[in-house]
Amino acid sequence: MQSGKIKHWNSDKGYGFIDVDNQSEDVFFHITSVRMAQPISEGQRVYFNSEHNEKNQLRATEVTSNELSTLKTSVSNSVANSTYRKSDNAHQKNNQHKNNRISHNKKSSFSILLSLIAIIAVAVYFFADLKSSFFADSTPSTSLSQNHIEPASTSNAAAITGDVQIDQTLALIQQGGPFPYPNKDGSTFYNREGKLPAQAQGYYREYTVPTPAVSHRGARRIVTGGHPPTIYYLTLDHYNSFQILQVK
């Protein structure tokens, strides 16, 4: 079982991402995998199990706020299975033919249920992938806003935007570090929100832009495309929107 904090949560669409402890790749989760009584909120600590999907992306299979809940579920299932086996053996002694027929029906029903779940999961996955591709080219190329100065007309990274933290991050990217979050900075950006043009996995990398007076990583990132980078994107709202930086 893994642990981490909820990094992003979209309540309207019912999905989000978990910032995993001691792991650079974030884990996607859907509302259907959540087993918590309290409302979901960003920054909330959770425990979960995960697995890779068909595209080798991590997806949480069960998310809970209690580390012991999955253990309790396993113990309860073991006790239930043990009781069922004892009862089933006694019933077989009385009526073997009837028990075999019931067991066959249960297996058939379970197989049908698994098939339906698999079909629904595939449909949801491909719908999300189609939506991501449809909106991939809609990223606007706009000037910086939210208290940022227009880009300066110079090739020096220290004067690209006029924002000290953004310009320092650009300089670190161009010189190859060192970065303030070595386990996160330079990791693959998977473009799960579909806000950037679709590219092969590994094309995009993300870097933290420190936010003054904030003790955690904050919501600002620079996402680069290509190796070495040929294009730079800035997000001020944790991947909800992007702006192109004119970096020479």
Image (cartoon, rainbow, N blue to C red):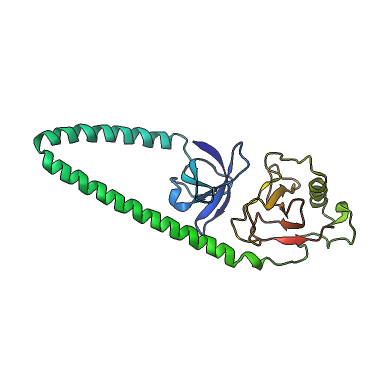
Q: Is residue 64 above or below residue 85?
A: below
Q: Is residue 3 above or below residue 142?
A: above
Q: Is residue 131 above or below residue 33?
A: below
| The quarter of the displayed image where residue 172 is located | top right
Q: What is the residue that sits farthest to the left in this orientation?
A: 94
Residue at 47%, 47% in the rendered image: 38
Counting every numbered tag in the picture gives 0
The answer to which of 56 and 191 lies nearer the viewer is: 56
Percent across and percent down for residue 13 are: 51, 59
| The quarter of the displayed image where residue 178 is located | top right
The answer to which of 79 and 136 lies nearer the viewer is: 136
Percent across and percent down for residue 22 are: 61, 36
Residue at 11%, 33% in the rendered image: 93
Percent across and percent down for residue 226 are: 73, 54
Left or right: 76 as drawn, with respect to 122: left
Percent across and percent down for residue 71 are: 41, 33
Quadrant including the C terminus: bottom right
Residue at 32%, 36% in the rendered image: 77
The answer to which of 12 and 234 lies nearer the viewer is: 234
Left or right: 176 as drawn, with respect to 97: right
